[in-house]
Amino acid sequence: MTARSLFINKDRMLNIRQELAMLVGLNEAIVLNQIEYWLEFNERSGKNFIDGRYWTFNTYEDWQRDNFPFWSIPTIKRIFAKLEKDGYVISANHNTYSFDKTKWYSIDYKKLEESMMNNRTYQNDTTDVSFCDIRANQDEPTNTREYYTENTSKSTLNSFSKEKGGANTPTDRIGAKDDVFHNDGKDVKGEVLTRTIRLCRDKLFYDDDSVVENIINTISYYFDKYHEHTGGFHPRMSDQTLIKVIEKLVEGSKDFEDLISFDNGYYSLIDKHFTVNYGKNIDWHLPHFATEGIIQRLAYKSDYY
């Protein structure tokens, strides 16, 4: 990209009407314009129509990544807060699970019209002012979470190791090369569960609510057992690793469908997992458990056989 392409690349531009910027403020107009874009997208798709209006949902991190990379997250938060305070944006929680705090947004068009009528400086001018647009390569907003931020601190755990007797763990183990665990002493179970919902819907396209619920319950149970046995909290996982974990849990329930009832069958295997002596370099992380070889070995060692 050259410097001149910043000015002439018209297909990467977002048109903001001057009237909207004059009415609500420049930054607020940029955000409103993006919200309107996604509301129109959902209307065309026939989705997220609740209580007589269309909604879009996202987190501040994803608003920044997918829509406003030129702003900091605190700036984005301030803009959304001002839009809500001024009444132009309505927020709600239409999430399925109680622990899911992702905010949903819609626009109060009536409030905008009232402001237009009361603003004497408003002119019916069709002149537009253009700003950088990120929409060319955007997907629909995903249900990621406000409190998730990747932590790249050096205090990490990545102990994909050997079992007792020196035998290597299965070659299908998850995350051995592409993931880093981040253990900052915080309870991240809620964060992981909400990201799991988003990944199930938006990346893995699971449309069976019972499957998603069983995945949530299994991961939640594992995190509880981890805390019970270690006294600490299970570390964060990247989306890439979490996707692999979810897929392995679903595949495992199919591979051992005669042995494992997905709604509770993993519980006994998880219990067994935390009693097995894996040797000096023990690995009690969820990605270690959610591998075909480990699940198979635990199934053989459990009461299923």
Image: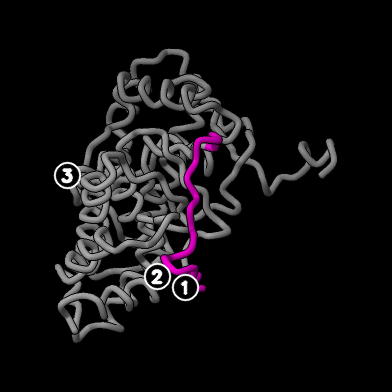
Per the image, the residue denoted by label 3 is: 98
Per the image, the residue denoted by label 1 is: 170
221 relative to 237 in the view: left or right: left
Up-down: is 206 above or below 197? below
Query: Considering depth in this image, is 270 or 300 the residue closer to the camera?
Result: 300
Quadrant containing the N terminus in the rendered view: top right
In three-dimensional space, the C-alpha distance between marks 2 and 1, rounded to whole angstroms, equals 7 Å
Label 2's element? Answer: loop
Task: Identify the residue at image location x=45%, y=54%.
Answer: 239
**CB contact under 8 Å: marks 1 and 3:** no
Task: Say if the magenta span includes residue 147.
Answer: no
Q: Total label count?
A: 3
**CB contact under 8 Å: marks 2 and 1:** yes
Magenta-tinted stretch: 152-171
Query: Considering depth in this image, is 93 or 217 the residue closer to the camera?
Result: 217
Residue occupying the far top of the picture: 120
Percent position (x, y) of residue 132?
64, 37
Say whether disc 2 or disc 1 marks the residue closer to the N-terminus.
1
Task: Say if the magenta span includes residue 163.
Answer: yes
Q: Amino acid at mark 3?
A: Ser
Per the image, the residue denoted by label 2 is: 291
In three-dimensional space, the C-alpha distance between marks 2 and 3, rounded to whole angstroms, equals 29 Å
95 relative to 46 in the view: left or right: left
